[in-house]
Amino acid sequence: RQRQMCIRDRVSTQSTGDQHPKMSEEYDDDYEEEKFYCYHISGFAQGQDFRRAMTDIHRAAECDEEAIDYSENEVPREKWPTFRKKMCRNFGFPEQVGADVVIYEGCERSDIKFIGGYNEFREVLLKRHPCFVNVNPTFHFYQ
């Protein structure tokens, strides 16, 4: 399943009556910035870390659906080494990242940042999406 590419940061503001958001140098309780994250997971389906990353992104997206969008790219195992090498070169990522998964973020090509393999990705999810901590860690979408 591939989800559509996501929009960048979304901001909710209170309008002043005209079409522009209210701006003030003072702290404004009506202004709330809501961060939106786009995660991209590439790997081969039989890989343990790919399955774990897909399970975690599904769980995180369920508990924080207003802040997360993601795409998954499942590559046949026999094509994975070549695909991974080309992808890492294309984005300037280290080539010796995780054996069966490469994860990065960015809603637009200019915003792409390397996350790493499964362990790094899990740390990012735990830090950015507090509701993820409370989700049952033994439930797996991909088994």
Image: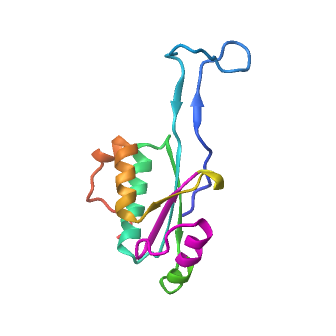
Q: Is residue 131 above or below residue 111?
A: above
Residue 63: percent from left, percent from top? 39, 44
**Image quarter of the N terminus:** bottom right
Foreground pick, 58 / 41: 41
> Total of numbered circles in the picture?
0
Q: Residue at x 62, y 45 (%)?
A: 7
Q: Residue at x 42, y 56 (%)?
A: 57
**Image quarter of the C terminus:** bottom left
Residue 121: percent from left, percent from top? 40, 58
Location of residue 131 by image quarter: top left
Q: Can residue 64 be seen from the camera position used here?
A: yes
Highlighted magenta segment, given as a residue range: 84-106
Location of residue 96 by image quarter: bottom left
Residue 126 magenta-highlighted: no
Q: Can residue 141 be seen from the camera position used here?
A: no
Q: Is residue 140 above or below residue 33?
A: below
Foreground pick, 7 / 139: 7
Q: Is residue 61 above or below residue 114?
A: above
Residue 97 magenta-highlighted: yes
Decide if residue 33 is on the left or right side of residue 45: right
Residue 110: percent from left, percent from top? 65, 53
Q: Residue at x 39, y 76 (%)?
A: 47
In the image, farthest residue toward the right:
18
Q: Is residue 130 above or below residue 29?
A: below
Q: Residue at x 59, y 72 (%)?
A: 89
